[in-house]
Amino acid sequence: CNLQFSFNLTKGVGRTDGEAPERGWANINPIAQSTKEMGPGSRRDTIDDHFNDWNWKKTISFGERMLSKIQEAVPARLEHEEVLEHFEASIPPEVIKEWTAVVENWERDASQPNPFKPTIKRTSEKSARLQLASEAAEEINEQRSDASISHSSVMIANGLQLEEEQRRLATDTANLGQHPTAKQLSALLERSNILRRKIAVWIEEQTLHMPQATHERAKYMQGASPEGTRSTKTSDIPLFLPSTFTNVTNLDKRLRTYEWILREGQAYDALEEIRHVLRLRSHMYKHKDRNSRGVKANTRSNTAIAGATARINRSAAKYRAARAALVKLAPGLELEQPLWEHTLRRLDPDDIRALSEGLYGDSEGRRSPSWIWMTYGVVPDHRENAASLNEALRIEWCRTRARAMRWAEEVKLLQEEMRRIIAFLDWQATWWESQGAAAAAACYEHSIIAGMVAYAHRQAAIRRALRDNFQHTWRNIPQFIQLGVHVKAGHLNTSIST
């Protein structure tokens, strides 16, 4: 729905303020307590009075409002057009022509395939493990590895699972509170002991595939305690996966490749979990607002929301750990996916928000979804790498083109709006004068006719005064727009209102 009907992607709408009709109702919310006691006629009259006041205030503010909008739109148009030009400079012209035809077909007919929508499925941790298991089976069948020893990819996959269990144990320990019960402490201690034994077994397995880890672990364990060993919590025991090593010359490249594949799937899974729980939490908020009444119901709702937030935080920690490992692994690998840093970006706290939620202070017309809702899937199958990369570039180009077009349309629409405002004020002034002439021809008393004519001429004079004021305020706008054609956006900071 967001891709199909978004104003940001719809041709011809410019930067239309779709929330403008709602602001009038928000303005008269305070009168609700009084109008609910009124009869139907009085209620309609009161609402009409308030909306007439709102509309008149909006009318007399057109001068400054249109000026500020054009001051924003001209530099923004130049900025986004430059971004689009730089983007297209690195893409073959025939590809641009093909993409343009696709997006223009969709703009003419929304039933055509949406070029903004990704179609290639992302990888997942399960699919990555399946791929590596298939490779291990091929090696065993071809007698390139010992069937009695677990494959190195299995060892790394098990290590990632242990890392996740360590993360969960650390989170649950931190959430115990100041006064945990004996049952809570014993449950955590049992989990810790079980996990420690799992890690010990895994370390023996790791020694067969990564002898370097044994040396690094021995160096790490030389701590500051009198016994010469470092005391560690179970959740802090280092696993020394391939991404831990900075010197990769003595490390089997296959190990780094295996961890890369698994970490990539882990990162996409974590993002999917974040998106899923964000949608769930949004539903929880709405359900609470509509249905929760009283302390008991609100406490239950708040507990559920807190649980969802905890799941989001765990998934965010998992994603950050996976991405940090990818950053360390990338330099030692010849990657065929140069866009991985664009699809798996750094996850800041402000990025973790619902699809319809903007940054603090963003209005509805200016907010943009977090990048986590626009991540493109990248598959591990080498035959599909080119298609995946092509789709990621196409979607990003389509969005860049849409932004440039919306701001260019906004400049044109603002000029047309200003022309129509002046024309309307001229017409309305003439209309008021005609009302005065009609009153003069009516069969009223002379004193009534004089008052009606005076009132009509006063209203006509107000419209002409507004017209003259707006024309004076906008007098330099044509030069400003023309200047913007030749000057870079960064240099357009001079005010045009003086």
Image: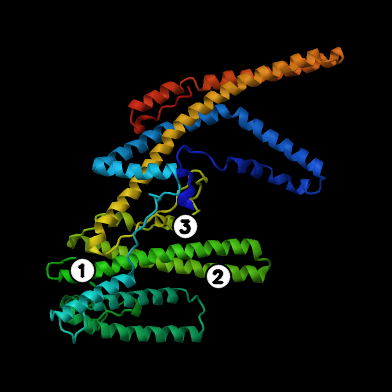
What kind of element bears circle 2?
Answer: helix
Q: Position of residue 364 (x, y in %)?
A: 52, 46
Q: Residues within 10 Å of mark 2 (few under 14, many from 20)?
A: some
What amino acid is labelled 3 in the image? Arg
Of all residues, the one furthest to the right in this rendering is 445
Q: Which residue is mark 3?
A: 353
Q: Position of residue 251 (x, y in %)?
A: 15, 71
Q: Earlier in the sequence, mark 1 or mark 3?
A: 1
Q: Would you say residue 238 is visible in this rendering? A: no
Q: How is the image coloured?
A: rainbow
Vertical side of 401 occupied by 223: above or below:
below
Residue 12, numbered circle: none
Q: Which residue is mark 1?
A: 256
Circles 1 and 3, Cβ within 8 Å, touching? The answer is no
Say which residue appears at 65% left-offset and 66% top-offset: 292
What amino acid is labelled 1 in the image? Arg
What kind of element bears circle 1?
Answer: helix
Q: Quadrant of residue 85?
A: top left
Say which residue appears at 48% left-offset and 55% top-offset: 355
Q: Residue 456 vs residue 118: left or right?
A: right
CA–CA distance between discs 2 and 1? Answer: 40 Å
Vertical side of 231 occupied by 474: above or below:
above
Vertical side of 20 occupied by 56: above or below:
above
What amino acid is labelled 2 in the image? Ala
Q: Position of residue 125 (x, y in %)?
A: 33, 70
CA–CA distance between discs 1 and 3? Answer: 33 Å
Residue placed most toward the observer, 215 or 477: 477
Q: Quadrant of residue 128?
A: bottom left
What kind of element bears circle 3?
Answer: loop
Q: Which residue is mark 2?
A: 304
Q: Residue 238 vs residue 350: left or right?
A: left
